Amino acid sequence: MLTIFTQSRLFKKVDYTLLLTVATIILFSLVIIYSATKPTDVLPVAEGVSNSGDAFASVKKQIINICLGFVAMAMALYIHYEDLAKHTKALYILNLIMLGAVLFVGDSALGAQRWIEIGPFRFQPSEFSKLIIIICFAAFLDSRQGRLNRFRDLLPCFAFIGVPLLFILKQPDLGTSLVFMAIMFGMLFVAGARPSLLIGLLLGGLALACLWIGAHFWFEAHSNYNLWIPLKDYQLKRLIIFINPWQDWHGDGYHIIQSQIAIGQGGLFGRGLFNGSQTHGNFLPIQETDFIFSVVGEELGFAGAILLLFLFFVLIYRCIHIAINARDNFGFLLSAGVVSMLTFHVLVNVGMTSGIMPVTGIPLPMFSYGGSNMVTNLAALGLLLNINMRRQQIVF
Amino acid sequence: MERKLMERKMQVVLVIVFTIFGLLAFRLFYMQLIQNDKFSTLARENRMRLTNITAPRGEVFDRWGGKLVGNEPVYTVSLVNLAGESTGDVVPRLASIMGINPVEIEEKIANQKQLYEPVKIATRVSPEVVTRIEEQRLELPGVVIDIEPQRQYPSGSILSHVMGYVRQINPEQLAEHQGEGYKMGDPFGQSGLEYTYEKFLRGQDGGRQVEVDSMARPVRDLGVKEPVPGNNLVLTIDQRVQKAAEEALEEGSKLAVSQGYGEARAGAAVALDVNTGAVLAMASYPSYDPVKLSGVLTQNDYEEIFNSPWKPMLNRALLAYAPGSTFKMIVAMAGLDTGKTTLESTISDPGYFFWGRAFNDWKLDGHGTVDLIKALKVSCDTYFYQLGLRLGIDEIARVAREFGLGEKTGIELPGEESGVVPDAVAKIEQRIPYLSSDDTKKVREIQQRYDELLGKTTDEAQRKALMSKRSSELQAVEWELDWHDYDTIISSIGQGDNRYTTLEMANYIATLANGGTRYKPYLVQRVVSQDGRLVQDNSPIELGRVSVSPASMAAARQGMLEVTLPPDGTAYGFFNGFPPVAAKTGTAEVLNHDSHALFVAFAPYDKPEIAVAVVIEYAGHGGTIGGPVAEDMIAAYLGLPIPGQKMINTPE
């Protein structure tokens, strides 16, 4: 009784700006998904031969995904988020089991195992694991306050993130691994780790990676020695092709170029909704998922793309706001993790479609077609709304 | 306070987030507003295609306006070289749908490397295959289906040798005609009139600007330039006569085979308008179906058409055969004209002529007392042995040449042979290729010397002079090459080196029938553009008039008339119910084979209109096998009921 009463009072404190922004992004996404998946009307060559198909099929499925997402959000709102901190051990283990399951019973797509099928549902545990790791790591950091200034202090953190990260690398899912890194660094930063140490690690790691890849290619070119690298060949190629896609413009560089053409020809106001030649001519690769931002760029131009970025910025701004106002450190850290995750997703996805980031297969949050991504993000935002609702002690 | 620090850090995070979004916004600004032109151009290159619309070729009509060759829309399958999409999987998949060898496709696309340029894989693709391709659309990026006009033959495959066939231009032809705007996959006349009249029949291709998707499928039409069809041909051919000729040749061949002449599988027939040289019919047997040659050629069809021992692709009307007794009118006219014989003079035929050895008549017990008319009527060999010997080969050759024998008629078809009029020079020309290694060193030395000299000159007169000099030099050393009386004797009955094309034979009979004017045979009456403009109008071309006297020709014609009369004309029994028809049978002996059957005729006798020549290879007797063909053709021409096959009992 009391809970219902308190809850109803709590609901008045829901961050409606955030909720409205999320709703706008999602509605926007439905229009773009429709455009991206609408079958191309081909001029009939032979009588009676047409490419019929349900133009709304993907939109309908995505609406189901959205509903599932809002259910997850509602559930995340309903619980006491503080309670989550008590169950992190169980969550952490559950996460490892899920990721392990992918490796053994998962379906593969594009040379990677990412999917698990349960009944009619197909889901990507690596998506959910992002949120789980945020929750667990927030609790972990909460318990280690003030002990983050030396490199030695960071080692347990690395180990904490490193175990599930290795599982994901094994799939292999480079994109999600990078999201984990982003989450970890973001949360370490706000948790008080020495910035110089983090920046040093970040730059050092980046330099090491570049050196490693450089050496790999140098050896490949100058001798038969094959320097081991923790990436498959296709990943490596995809990873670096963005630097100069034209060197293999009809091969690995093709999709990046097509995406850039789509965005670039959009101009200020775009070619008009449902009217993008790159989109409807299917020159764009996987245009309803990873490359959906290119559709926005092509059909709605700079104006549409900036509007979408603005919506994401508002969303992330609200998340930062929630973090600052969080009642406790756990909520604060959790929010910071979500901010890191969302920001990184937007940066890498938009950067990839516009050719300034490697292609790593990271979806645009709540915008790309797909259920796991939608559910994870809405659940995460549900937790944030939850944190926001309980930002002050309620005095009876 | 720890918390304060964290909040400050969060503000730093906000700055970082803002920077990131600013960076992305700047990147978009740069791409979409600064580089917009560049990307718009690239996008246009992606989606805009100028596709070709193949123009229909001109249609072909017979002299009465009946359509012989038209066009029909057929499906074509092309493969577009798409960037980013591997063809590795597409080629075998497409090949299996179409039932062809993937290597064929590989070969075709190997020639064309240019991006986005379609390479035609096959024309005349069946609707079933098209449907199956459409069903697998998404697995077949770059496969394009188009509709294109293709040759259609409303009257079936008649006149195939004259019309020839159309097929995709081959690389050699493409290289040769590059300047005329041909490109890979264009239709090109490969033989016959389709080849000779290519530049008239070929239309002007149109174009279509389309927007395509990434699989090269057209999405939107942006503009069309209509193609201009090629010019139509109106032929001199009379479809009725042509059809009769083709059917009769086939029946004649079957009849001969049924009579035990197993090699009688091929032949030719030509009908000319006596007064113009217009070709009324030109048939060659066996024939082929030009439709089969236009599309995907199956292995079976290929074998049937190109590797058949009966060589259906040959236009036998343009190949030279020994004329046999159909040559006798030439000798008769030469005899009368030079006074070596008269209509009154007679010989007594014992069934042979002895001159160094015995030359037998076909009738071994002889024809009794024979004058010139009777000699033609009963085809008396003895009479012509004697007359020929008195004339000498040069007189015979002169008259033969006046009637156009041994000389290409110049008809608008490729592959015409000139034939051979026998004389001393011709004999050596004929024998030279067969001189064997045991011939004296001297012979080889002479040959070598003249080969060099002949190779150096292209002037026709000079070549002739050289050849005749070579002949005399060779004759001096080689008895075999010398001209002998027996050469004259056998040449007088159309054997020996005599060899003429059926077209030449028909023209010789036409010249004889019209009183001595030799016309150039022609097939195309006029060329008319699609909008009805007359592009070319062909009128009869006179090649010459014979010097033989009208009386001599009249006698030869009368002799031919007698041939069809009872009781002992060699073609008596044919042409019942016809106006008087003049004819001559011929049976040309072939070493180691059955004789060729020949038949020439013109009709009506009094006022000649049509001249006909027929040959059926290895069919034994000219009258029996050749006669019905001529009969059917003339009947068709005159509008009489076509008699069909019949047996006659006069062998020759």
Image: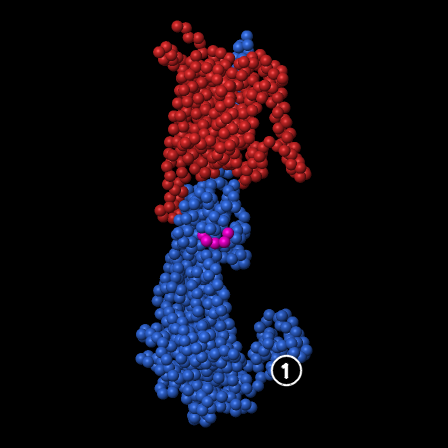
Chain colours: A red, B blue
Quadrant position of the N terminus of chain B in the picture: top right
**Residue indicated by mark 1:** B478
Label 1 sits on a secondary structure element that is loop
Q: Is residue B522 left or right of residue B394?
A: left
Q: Nearer the viewer, residue B103 or B125?
A: B103
Q: Nearer the viewer, residue A6 or B515?
A: A6
Asked whether residue B638 appears in the rendered view, the answer is no
B195 within the magenta span: no
Q: Nearer the viewer, residue B141 or A388?
A: A388
Q: Position of residue A70 (x, y in %)?
A: 40, 23
Q: Is residue B282 above or below residue A347?
A: below
Kindly identify which chain the residue marked by label 1 belongs to: B
Bounds of the magenta span?
B98-102
Say few, some or many: other residues with alpha carbon within 10 Å of mark 1 (under 14 / 14 to 19 / 20 or more): some
Residue A274 falls in which quadrant of the image? top left
Q: Is residue B47 above or below residue B473?
A: above
Q: Is residue B384 left or right of residue B481?
A: left
Residue type at the position of mark 1: Glu
Residue found 50% across the figure and 18% down from its top = A88
Q: Is residue B272 above or below residue B151?
A: below
Quadrant position of the C terminus of chain B in the picture: bottom left
Q: Nearer the viewer, residue B479 or B515?
A: B479
Residue found 46% across the figure and 76% down from its top = B618
Residue found 40% across the figure and 42% down from its top = A42
Q: Position of residue B424 (x, y in %)?
A: 57, 81
Asked whether residue A252 appears in the rendered view, the answer is yes
